[in-house]
Image (tube, rainbow, N blue to C red):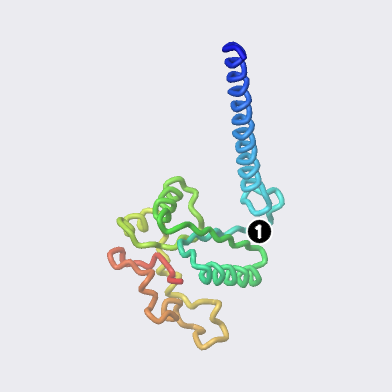
Amino acid sequence: MTAIDMERRRKRSERIRNWIGFAILGGALAWAVVVVVVRTFGPESDLSLTQDKKIIRLVHWQLEGGYVKGMNEAMREYEKLHPDVSVQQIDIHERAYNQWVQTQLIGRTAPDLIELRFGPDLANRVVRYFVPITDIVDRPNPYNEGTDLEGLPWRETYMDGMMGGYFGELQDYYGVPT
């Protein structure tokens, strides 16, 4: 085999590897486009043409199996009481959680319910992006009708008076403990 033949083989082999790389890249791009379209316009999206339910998105960093399962059960019970509502759970690993939430808040794409996770500058983030709920937690919880807790302000139905959701420096409730 001559040096010219060897060079031709090398170039041919290089071209084949390039085409395989382009095919893999094209396949990955096509897959990404399909995923984005389905998530954007699929039956569970806000932009779905067939969606007749309100969607409530909830994000948390508790990835323990029991927590996720318990949240799913609570969400299904809520949906039974409110058939026009779909509740979706977003679970983010705790290492990326604060950054993910901050990015969503800044981009105005945050979910409806966000588990507060203490970290640097939490009070500033809360006062900037969250709505105080003090007036709501001072009212009776309508889901307690017919129980021993009926008529009590919502915060008084917690053993700690809902202190986990109270920000003393802001003098308001901004969260509901799980």
Q: Position of residue 45 (x, y in %)?
A: 63, 51
Identify which residue, 124 or 178, lies in the foreground: 178
Vertical relation: 14 (above or below) 160:
above
Residue 149 relative to residue 35: left or right: left
Quarter where residue 116 is shown? bottom left
The mark total stands at 1
Farthest right residue? 50
Q: Secondary structure under badge 1?
A: loop
Residue 108 relative to residue 51: left or right: left
How many residues crowd around disc 1 within 10 Å: few (fewer than 14), some, or many (20 or more)?
some
Identify which residue, 40 or 172, lies in the foreground: 40
Residue at x-position 42% and y-position 47%: 106
Farthest left residue? 169
Q: Position of residue 2 (x, y in %)?
A: 60, 12
Identify which residue, 148 or 37, lies in the foreground: 37
Vertical relation: 76 (above or below) 112:
below
Residue at x-position 52% and y-position 71%: 66
Residue 146 relative to residue 120: left or right: right
| Residue beneath disc 1 | 53
Farthest front residue? 1
Q: Position of residue 174 (x, y in %)?
A: 39, 65
Q: Position of residue 12 (x, y in %)?
A: 62, 20
Quarter where residue 125 is shown? bottom left
Residue at x-position 59% and y-position 71%: 73
Identify which residue, 89 or 172, lies in the foreground: 89
The image quadrant where one finds the N terminus is top right
Residue type beneath disc 1: Lys
